[in-house]
């Protein structure tokens, strides 16, 4: 009887869809193949996979911000994180990346929910999958958790996030990888020698290039324009 509509009013499915459309303003229509709709829940599994994909991107964003905000002296220190709490429980003045940590924990839960949903979706035996309550529970939880976590991350982290401009400028000026921009000008071997000299002597790339006589100060400043690398 599963999927046949036996003992059901012939207009029941259409009437329910019409009522849902009136209440929610969303398009609903009866399944073209009720047997397939009852036996498999691929659409819900694909929705869960999309939520997992969003969680994957959010983990990277949160971790990048957490690492860039590490420090200020023993880490990267390139971002100033908002001071949402009065320091660490044992380290006065420390700013913990609590919002980034909260977001990544939520994303880990989304991964777990998706694994449960994927397994449940595989359990459609013959004409019926009885795991739909588990699928629905985890889908709704994933949506609610992600919505709340992203809103909190935006309100309590992104909104007041500030770049540490002095540290960023220092890191850029001391970066040896900027030598890549000089390769078309002085050649690969000279560029490599300049980077190695700067690393060995603990000086800037500019000082190394001038010391080795590859370019004049004016030429270096003309060719070494980091903003051009970013298309600015």
Image (tube, rainbow, N blue to C red):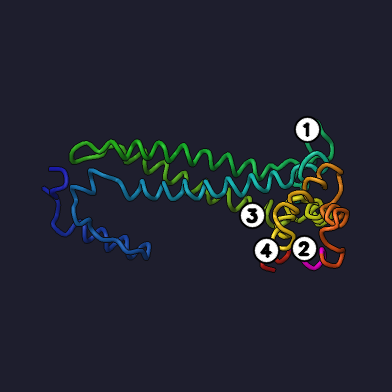
Q: Secondary structure at mark 3?
A: helix
Residue on which the image places disc 4: 230
Asked if one can make out residue 105 in the rendered structure from this viewpoint, the answer is: yes
Disc 1 or disc 4, which is closer to the eye? 4
Give neighbour class at mark 4: few <14, some 14-19, many 20+ (Cα, 10 Å).
few
Q: Which residues are magenta?
A: 220-226
Disc 2 or disc 4, which is closer to the eye? 2
The answer to the question of whether label 1 and label 2 lie on touching residues, with beta carbons closer than 8 A, is no
Screen quadrant of the C terminus: bottom right
Residue on which the image places disc 1: 89
Residue on which the image places disc 2: 224
Characterize the magenta stretch by its predominant secondary structure.
Answer: helix
Q: Earlier in the sequence, mark 3 or mark 4?
A: 3
The answer to the question of whether label 2 and label 4 lie on touching residues, with beta carbons closer than 8 A, is no
As measured in the structure, the alpha-carbon distance from the residue carrying label 3 to the one carrying label 1 is 24 Å
Residue on which the image places disc 3: 154
The x and y percentages for residue 31 are 22, 55
As measured in the structure, the alpha-carbon distance from the residue carrying label 2 to the one carrying label 3 is 36 Å
46 drawn magenta: no
- Name above or below for residue 12 compared with residue 2: below
The answer to the question of whether label 3 and label 1 lie on touching residues, with beta carbons closer than 8 A, is no
As measured in the structure, the alpha-carbon distance from the residue carrying label 3 to the one carrying label 4 is 26 Å
Disc 1 or disc 2, which is closer to the eye? 2
Q: Which residue is at 73% across, 56% downward?
A: 160
As measured in the structure, the alpha-carbon distance from the residue carrying label 1 to the one carrying label 4 is 40 Å
Q: Which residue is at 43% across, 50% downward?
A: 50
Q: Secondary structure at mark 2?
A: loop
């Amino acid at each position: 009887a599963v999927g046949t509509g036996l003992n059901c009013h012939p207009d029941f499915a259409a009437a329910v869809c019409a009522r849902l459309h009136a209440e929610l303003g969303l398009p609903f229509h009866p399944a073209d193949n009720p047997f397939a709709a009852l036996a498999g829940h691929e659409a819900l599994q694909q929705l869960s996979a999309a939520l997992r994909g969003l969680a994957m991107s959010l983990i990277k964003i949160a971790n990048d911000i957490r690492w860039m905000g590490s420090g200020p002296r023993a880490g990267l220190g390139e971002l100033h994180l908002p001071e949402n709490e009065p320091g660490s429980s044992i380290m006065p003045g420390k700013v913990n990346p609590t919002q980034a940590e909260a977001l990544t924990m939520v994303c880990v839960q989304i991964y777990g929910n998706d694994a449960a949903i994927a397994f449940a979706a595989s359990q459609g035996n013959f004409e019926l999958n009885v795991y739909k309550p588990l699928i629905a529970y985890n889908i709704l939880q994933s949506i609610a958790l992600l919505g709340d976590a992203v809103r909190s991350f935006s309100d309590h982290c992104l909104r007041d996030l500030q770049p540490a401009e002095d540290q960023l400028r220092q890191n850029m000026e001391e970066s040896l990888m900027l030598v890549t921009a000089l390769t078309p000008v002085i050649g690969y071997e000279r560029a490599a020698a300049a980077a190695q000299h700067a690393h060995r002597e603990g000086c800037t790339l500019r000082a190394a290039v001038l010391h080795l006589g590859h370019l004049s100060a004016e030429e270096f400043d003309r060719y070494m324009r980091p903003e051009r690398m970013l298309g600015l």
